Image (cartoon, rainbow, N blue to C red):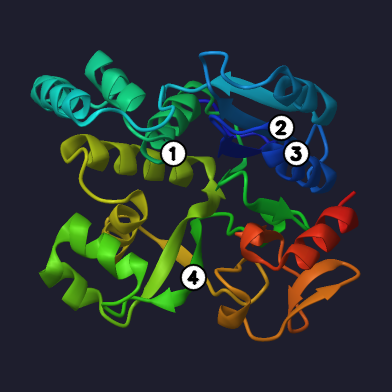
Amino acid sequence: MDQPTSQDWILGYATNASAAAVEPFMRSARRWHPRPGCRIVLFVSANGAQAVDVHALAQRYGVDLVPATSQWAGQRPLRTKIAARGALAWWRLWAPADSAAALALGAWLHPHYTRWLDYHRFLQAHPRAGKVFLSDVTDVIFQANVFERIDPHRLTIAELPLAFDGRNIDSAWMRDAAGPQRLRALMGRTVLCIGTVGGPWRRVAELCQTLWQTMCDRPFRGVEQAIFNDLYYRGALGSCVLRANDGDFVLTTTSPEDCPGLALRPDGLGLGARTPAVVHMFNRLPPLWQRALGVGLG
């Protein structure tokens, strides 16, 4: 296998997203990760559903666009869902996770699931990378070089300012994905965010393969974040570094109330004395804060 190079990669999934929705991500990512040291890749709708101005933005900021496997474009009739899921469930029994059956499954599933197939295939086809950061797109902005905050040998995972408590949405997701007994075993454990994960190429590639294989083994069951947390707490993801939601690696603003001390500063959004490399879920901040962040990143 080729040896990794010094070029780092940011990968994101942006199917069915408008130019206005992806522009803050593209702009801030490129500002803090200039070429040629960083390659930014976004997976976009392959059916031409996205406007030409998304492609114009990609050219402006030096972002590579790759057609996504997912063909998801909204809700489908119930009988269509039942028929398609039955056919795919039968087909996958005789096919490995990198087969045509997996591609058909990926085309049907929501992009939150299919991105792990596309990330897996892309990383296997392009093994010459240094560090890789997998990111949500439409609710993420960068305020510093994220690769300086990522462990060079292990997965770096962002914690959320939440714990499994039996009442919040992550608890409901875990109950649906792994059952009530598993949720009881995880009560009080910190919820980990699947939307912002980084690490060296090999560890990130292994993560993508593990997640996609798990989703192939039990499709249509469980939100991906619950699957991710279940795998981590079972020890299935290997050695990882957990980074607290304290404003260093990723600051996830589930709500201002969850992040006491949150403040706008000249260098961006911060928590205490720290300025995070990434702000996640910035769209949950008050509109005035969002506008200030947008102007500050210009």
Q: Residues within 10 Å of mark 2 (few under 14, many from 20)?
A: some
The answer for how far apart the CA atoms under marks 1 and 3 are is: 27 Å
Viewer-closest of 99 and 251: 251
Q: Can residue 6 be seen from the camera position used here?
A: no
**Badge 1 is on which residue?**
205
SS category of the residue bearing label 4: strand
Location of residue 146 in the rendering, given as x and y in whole percent from the top left corner:
69, 55
**Badge 2 is on which residue?**
19
Tell me which numbered mark, 1 or 3, is placed earlier along the sequence.
Answer: 3
Q: Residues within 10 Å of mark 3 (few under 14, many from 20)?
A: some
Tell me which numbered mark, 4 or 1, is placed earlier along the sequence.
Answer: 4
Q: Residue at 20% across / 71% down in the picture?
A: 183
- The amino acid type found where label 3 is placed reads Glu
Q: Is residue 141 left or right of residue 194?
A: right
Q: Which mark lies nearer to you, 2 or 4?
A: 2
The answer for how far apart the CA atoms under marks 2 and 4 are is: 28 Å
Location of residue 197 in the rendering, given as x and y in whole percent from the top left corner:
52, 53
Q: Residue at 9% across / 20% down in the picture?
A: 94
Viewer-closest of 57 and 217: 57
Q: Residue at 49% across / 23% down in the picture?
A: 68
The answer for how far apart the CA atoms under marks 4 and 3 are is: 25 Å
Q: Residue at 14% across / 29% down in the picture?
A: 82
The answer for how far apart the CA atoms under marks 4 and 1 are is: 23 Å
Q: Which mark lies nearer to you, 1 or 3?
A: 3
Q: Which mark lies nearer to you, 2 or 1?
A: 2
Residue 23 bears which disc, if any?
3
The answer for how far apart the CA atoms under marks 2 and 1 are is: 29 Å
Q: Residues within 10 Å of mark 1 (few under 14, many from 20)?
A: many
The answer for how far apart the CA atoms under marks 2 and 3 are is: 6 Å
**Badge 4 is on which residue?**
160
Q: Is residue 224 left or right of residue 144?
A: left
